[in-house]
Image: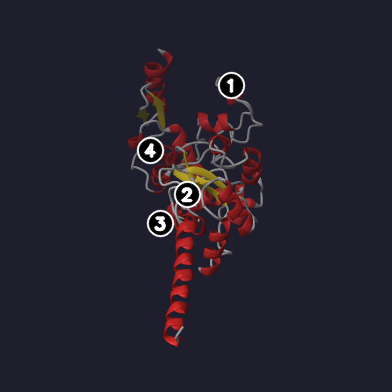
Amino acid sequence: MTLRRFVLAALLLVLTIAGGAAAWVAHTLSPVDPAGVERRFDVRAGASLWKIARDLEAAGLVRDARAIVALARWQEVDAAVRAGEYALSPAWDTRRVLEQLVEGRVITYEVVLPEGLTAVEIATRLAEQQLVEPEAFLALVRDPASPAAFGVEGPTLEGYLFPETYRMPHGLEARQVAKILVDHFLAQWQPLEAGARARGFGMRETVTLASIVEKETGAAPERPLVASVFWNRLRRGMRLESDPTTIYGIPDFDGNLTRAHLEDETNRWNTYRIDGLPPSPIANPGAASLAAVVTPAESDYLFFVARGDGTHVFARSFGEHVANVNRYQRRR
């Protein structure tokens, strides 16, 4: 064999080997099942890359554990895989599977937190989506150290768990979930703070009164007017006399507010017996109620009573209020 023929034969062998290697790489990185559908896959916190790769292969999501490990190391992302719950498909190639894990595109769950829920009710809704352990969440909310840690004015996180529709992944700690909610509140509070302080209210007072407005208001347009009634009563040194505040301070309230409840002087939230605001918010108010407290309607109303259709009738004097009560409440 001449030298030229030897060189050509060697070159052909190298190309054949290289082509075979390229074909192997292409095959091992290709989808396991082009017709496959998405399935859930958990990456445990602290799991090694090899453990994750073997689990992916066993689940039929990648062809070869060695291939995804090699790819991750070649891309220098072998330490970047994030823990969480994923929706992965055998119809994806290995590159896409790795991309999902590195970018942390975990499954998220929607939870709707309407305005006016208490912390207990919020904990229940979060727990229904398996986003928190309710006991751990409430322990954090009630911890006297939590307000300062989250940048709000205590005594607890009640009032600062902002109502919104959220999407969250499983696996977050109670502190992480609470921070998401409180950070949403702080974003709402920032543009209102100057106006609140101009009226002589800080964060805690504003949120406390907003929580009362939230619980007292059935018709959204009435919020500024309801807020004006409470502001007018505070200015005159009148007690707020709000049923929702009193109810908040009754353990295991059964839905029947009695005269004995209204006369209970041991209830710190009983605004029929205490002067001024109660010691804390009674619910978690939304943006509209916060804004209504900072910019209430201009009125000289001191009383309101429910009509029974979600709206209220307002009065300037006690005599007018009694007439409204007789008309809208006692006849029912």
- Mark 1–mark 2 Cα distance, whole angstroms, equals 58 Å
Label disc, if present, on residue 223 of the rendered structure: 4
Mark closest to the chain's N terminus, 3 or 2: 2
Q: Are marks 1 and 2 in contact (CB under 8 Å)?
A: no
* Residue 254, disc: 1
Near mark 1 (Cα within 10 A), the count class, few <14, some 14-19 or many ≥20, is few
Residue 249 picture location, percent across and down: 61, 32
The residue lying toward the viewer, choosing from 61 and 289, is 61
Q: What residue type is labelled 1?
A: Asp
The CA distance from mark 3 to mark 1 is: 39 Å
Q: Which mark is residue 191?
A: 3
Residue 317 percent location from the top left of the image: 39, 29
**What amino acid type should be assigned to the residue bearing mark 3?**
Pro
Q: Which of marks 4 and 1 is in front?
A: 1
Comes first in the chain, label 4 or label 2: 2
- The nearer-to-camera label among 1 and 2 is 2
Query: Dot 3, how many residues are within 10 Å of its Cα: few (below 14), some (14-19), or many (20+)?
Result: few
The secondary element bearing badge 4 is classed as: helix
Residue bearing the label numbered 2 = 32
**Disc 2 element:** loop
Mark 3 or mark 1: name the one nearer the start of the chain. Answer: 3
Disc number lying in front (3 or 4): 3
Q: Looking at the picture, does residue 249 appear above or below residue 19?
A: above
Q: Which colour scheme is used?
A: secondary structure
Disc with the residue nearer the chain's start (3 vs 4): 3
Q: Which of marks 3 and 2 is in front?
A: 2
Q: Residue 190 location, x and y as percent?
A: 44, 57
